[in-house]
Image (cartoon, helix red, strand yellow):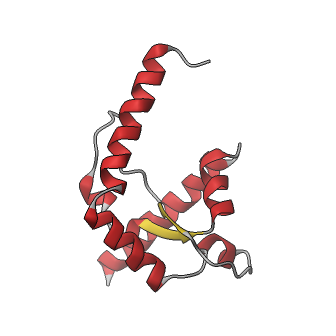
Amino acid sequence: MKNSTDNKKYLENKKKRREIYNSKEWIHLSRLKRQDQPLCEMCLKNDRVTPSNQVHHIKSFLTKEGNIDYDLAYDYNNLMSLCTDCHVMIHCHNDGRKKRKVWEDYYEEKNNLKKND
């Protein structure tokens, strides 16, 4: 069981995430992402065609200190369309951290390519 400090930090971070996810900017941006990419990007990488129903931040917009990086939160290039199963796998499965790191590396590579164009 988590101690009270961990629980307090979890609740604070949850509140900060809600601030982003309830904002008009996020609602608009996530709809736009799903319109542009209606299929799950992870499933496509595995030769499966699955409709997306969620939008995921590749790199977390919460810093290690628990602050919100608004630029990262609303960065279209930091988003990926996912199905529920893939989103759960990224966040909850034992290999979720490894999977998240793979997609963070993908984000970095994608942004470096755009800078070099």
Q: Position of residue 5 (x, y in %)?
A: 43, 17
The residue sitting at 44% across, 67% down in the picture is: 79
Q: Which image quarter: residue 29?
A: bottom left
Q: Decide if residue 1 is in sight here.
A: yes
The residue positioned 38% from the left and 79% from the top of the image is: 32
Q: Is the N terminus in the top left, top right, bottom left or bottom right quadrant?
A: top right
Identified at 73% across, 75% down, the residue is 46
Left or right, 80 with respect to 13, comes to right
Q: Position of residue 43 (x, y in %)?
A: 68, 73
Residue 73 versus residue 64: which sits nearer the camera?
Answer: 73
Image height check: is 74 above or below 90?
below
> What residue is shown at x 37% (from left), y 56% (from top)?
21
Instruction: Return the x and y of residue 95 as percentages of the image width and height.
Output: 69, 47
Look at the picture and state if 61 lies above or below 65.
below
Q: Is residue 56 left or right of residue 26?
A: right
Residue 62 appears in the picture as rendered? no
The C terminus appears in which quarter of the rendering?
bottom left
Q: Is residue 3 left or right of residue 1?
A: left
